Amino acid sequence: MQMPDGLPAEIDLSRPSAARVYDYFLGGAHNFEIDRQLAEQIASMTPNLAGTMRAGREFLRRAVRALLDAGIDQFLDIGSGIPTVGNVHEVAQSANPKARVVYVDIDPVAVAHSRELLAGNDLTAVIHADLREPGRILAESREPGLLDFNRPLGILLAGVVHFIPDADRPGDILATLRSAAAPGSHLVISHSTYEDQPQEMLDAQRLSARTDTEITLRSRAEITSFFGDWTILEPGVVHMPLWRPDSPSDVDDKPEQFGAFGGVARYDRPAG
Ligand SMILES: C[S@@+](CC[C@H](N)C(=O)[O-])C[C@H]1O[C@@H](n2cnc3c(N)ncnc32)[C@H](O)[C@@H]1O
């Protein structure tokens, strides 16, 4: 098959990709027919899903702003996706032009487009890696000029941990990432859940098995456990629209319909 210009040859265009399906839902241009077909199929089963993805992006934007307000000026965004409107570096650098962002994604299309978009932005970098290799991600993001793990940083895991099945021990992956961070660091997680969801939403999630990455829905308690002993900030691990909305009128009648919890925690220096 002829590869579109500028894309790496290892991309499998015969299978839909989670990153490109997500890009389509957000109105981006970095997707192919195979991705659009799956996206339309999912959307016809759950008209809510495009809204869910937008709600996820909005949660991430609000969380990044909260971290900036707390003085965080360096971000490790794992499962960053294809750059679409309102990227983390845009939000961060509009508040602090010196903010650094390292993007990490498993999807070669997301990585190729991120590199293209960020060419010339010296305060950002893109790593092609799998969240299941946290040691490699940490080593590469410590390279000179990238992140300083002796200072507080923001670790962003928005809509990605649900791609890690229990067999791959997501709790251990999270523990590795947390243990590398300095006190004052923050962890942001949004994660799909089966709690409070109608059957049609659960059916649509099963379609994710057709992308390279199947989703594992988890309970609020399981998602909360990923923050370890860090201090969970108000209002806790909640349905995404309920996490510090810009205005009460932004919160839909049924915030649970978006099918994912979001939360932010801070690593407080251990006493003693
Ligand atoms: C739903 S998108 C979320 C994008 C962005 N974080 C956001 O919230 O807007 C999930 C992204 O995670 C990436 N992903 C899935 N499994 C991954 C893994 N094991 N390691 C790294 N990235 C992964 C996908 O390629 C996709 O780009």
Image (cartoon, helix red, strand yellow):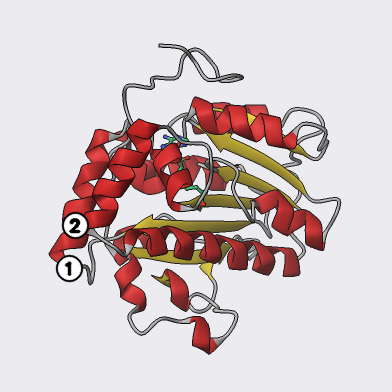
Q: Amino acid at mark 1?
A: Pro
The residue at 36%/85% (across/down) is: 253
Q: Which residue is mark 2?
A: 202
Q: Which residue is mark 1?
A: 198
The quadrant of the picture occupied by the C terminus is: bottom right
Residue 210 x %, y %: 24, 35
Q: Amino acid at mark 2?
A: Leu
* Disc 2 residue crowd, few under 14, some 14–19, many 20+, Cα 10 Å: some
Residue 131 x %, y %: 47, 35
Instruction: Give left or right: position of 144 versus 15.
Output: right
Residue 167 visible at all? yes
Residue 240 falls in image quadrant: bottom left
Residue 120 falls in image quadrant: top right
Label 2 vs label 1: CA separation?
A: 7 Å
Q: Nearer the viewer, residue 205 or 151?
A: 205
Q: Residue furthest right?
A: 98
Residue 218 x %, y %: 27, 56
> Which element type, helix, strand or loop, lies under badge 2?
helix
Q: Is residue 183 above or below residue 2?
A: below
The quadrant of the picture occupied by the N terminus is: top left
Q: Nearer the viewer, residue 162 or 59?
A: 59
The residue at 20%/57% (across/down) is: 45
Q: Is residue 5 above or below residue 192?
A: above
Instruction: Give left or right: position of 6 versus 250.
Output: right
Q: Nearer the viewer, residue 33 or 247?
A: 33
The residue at 62%/53% (across/down) is: 85
Q: Is residue 248 above or below residue 108?
A: below
Residue 228 visible at all? no
Instruction: Give left or right: position of 102 versus 230.
Output: right
Residue 79 x %, y %: 50, 41
